Every structure is written in C-alpha cells, then in structure tokens.
Image (cartoon, rainbow, N blue to C red):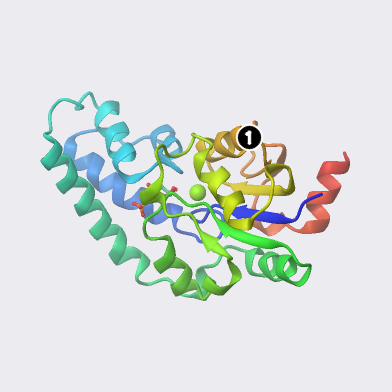
Amino acid sequence: ELKGFAFDLDGVIADTAKFHSQAWHQTADKVGTTWTPELQEALKGVSRMDSLEMILKAGGHENDYTQAEKEALAAEKNENYGKLIATLTPDDILPGMKAFLDELVANGYKLSLASASKNAPKILKYLGLTDYFVGIVDPATLHAGKPDPEIFARAAEILDLPANQVAGLEDSSAGIESINGAGELSIGIGSQLKAAKVIFNSTAEVSLANIKAALAE
Ligand code: G6P
Ligand code: MG
C-alpha cells in the first residue's frame, strides 16, 4: 500500500525544464554543439556537470576544455538559469499539481523531493510549496545521479518508508530508471516514458483516482 510520494521537480511540479533547456542551448551554441530535440530530452534529470559533459560529447568536444573551463561553463549556465527562475511564482506550478499535492496531504501521504537540482529549495520557495515536503534529498551528497537508484532510495529514507510503499513521479527517462531501480512505483509524465509503470500524458491527469485506476488495469 502506498504511503508516500517522492517527487521530481523540474518538469513535474514546476515548468522549469524549458528554462534548463534554454540555458543549455546557449551553452551548446557557445561550444559548437548542434542543439537537437534528442539532446534536449536526454539532458532531463541529469546533473549539471553530467549535462555539460553530454553536451560537449554530442559535438565531439569532450577533450577541448580543461576542468576549470568546464566549471566556468557550468557556472555561466547556472547564472543564466538563475535569471530565468527568478521570475517564478505560484502561477508556474504545472497544471493540476497544486491540487494533487493538496489531495496527497489531505489523505495523509508523506512527500519528499528527489530532484537533481541544487536550485530546488529556492524554486520550492518561489512556488510557495516548501511546507508540503517532509524533506529534500541534497543532490550534493549523492555518489551517483539519476539514472542511479540512489536519489530515489534516499527520498524513501527521508519518508521513513520501505521502497514498496513509495511512488516516484518523473518526467525523464533517467528518473524513471532511478525509481524502478530503487524498487518504487514509477509514475511517468510524458507518453515517451515507456519504462514507467504508470504513464500520464500531462501533469493535469495526475490524481489519486487516476493512479488507482491505472494500477487496476
Ligand atoms: C534537474 C533537471 C536537469 C538539471 C539538474 C541539475 O534534474 O531536470 O535538467 O540539469 O536538475 O540542476 P541544477 O539546478 O543543479 O543545475
Ligand atoms: Mg524532471
């Protein structure tokens, strides 16, 4: 029986995936990597430095930059991203998600956050959602990011629940792999997430009734 939910943030709760993409697109242009829809999709859920490595590799530039130069590129991306998220308000919560969070709390479920983003606490504050969560996994303390199961395993620990009582919500295939690897129920937002146990086309469809209906099928 489900007792807790571990949430991804970017692209699940907040409409911020577009801001990550916008800022990384600038980086790709700068290093001379062609920006493609496939690259954009593959970067979802991936940590800042791993994302940069993927962008460099996609253009064959993985050996063109020193570690210090890579860190400067990542810092510049985060600065650009920081300007984009500074405009966030509760209106930027994705459709249906405020209602779903309220429904979960009203029904006694515990919530934690499993985002790879170091900006997550700030974003939750902008959205006015900090108090919904028992805790947030600090991505700086992880040995390996998504698709490794560690982040979703830690999110269940924060909830003090065994994996089989936890559902994870994700919009990235790296994240779905992490949830599945942690032994939790994977709920995917996006029809391309074939490895998810439950798949919704958009956040607007996510509700306890719809999850139960999907599981009963
Ligand atoms: C999330 C996003 C990724 C982002 C990562 C790190 O997982 O989906 O696109 O690269 O967080 O975010 P940060 O804010 O720490 O750079
Ligand atoms: Mg995401």
Picture coordinates of residue 81 (x, y %)? Answer: 31, 58
Residue at left offset 45%, top offset 42%: 44
Binning the other alpha carbons within 10 Å of mark 1 as few (below 14), some (14 to 19) or many (20 upward) gives many
Q: Residue at x 32, y 45 (%)?
A: 48
Q: Position of residue 47 (x, y in %)?
A: 37, 43
**Amino acid type, mark 1:** Asn
- Residue reaching furthest to the right: 216
The reply, left or right, for residue 29 in relation to residue 204 is: left
Q: Position of residue 157 (x, y in %)?
A: 59, 51
Check disc 1 and report its element: helix, strand or loop: helix
Q: Residue at x 27, y 55 (%)?
A: 78
Q: Position of residue 215 (x, y in %)?
A: 83, 42
- Judged left or right of residue 182, residue 58 is left
* Camera-side residue of 191 and 8: 8
Instruction: Give the number of marks.
Output: 1
Decide: is 85 above or below 177: below
> Cβ of disc 1 within 8 Å of ligand 2?
no
- Classify residue 144 by image quadrant: top left
Q: Residue at x 47, y 38 (%)?
A: 146
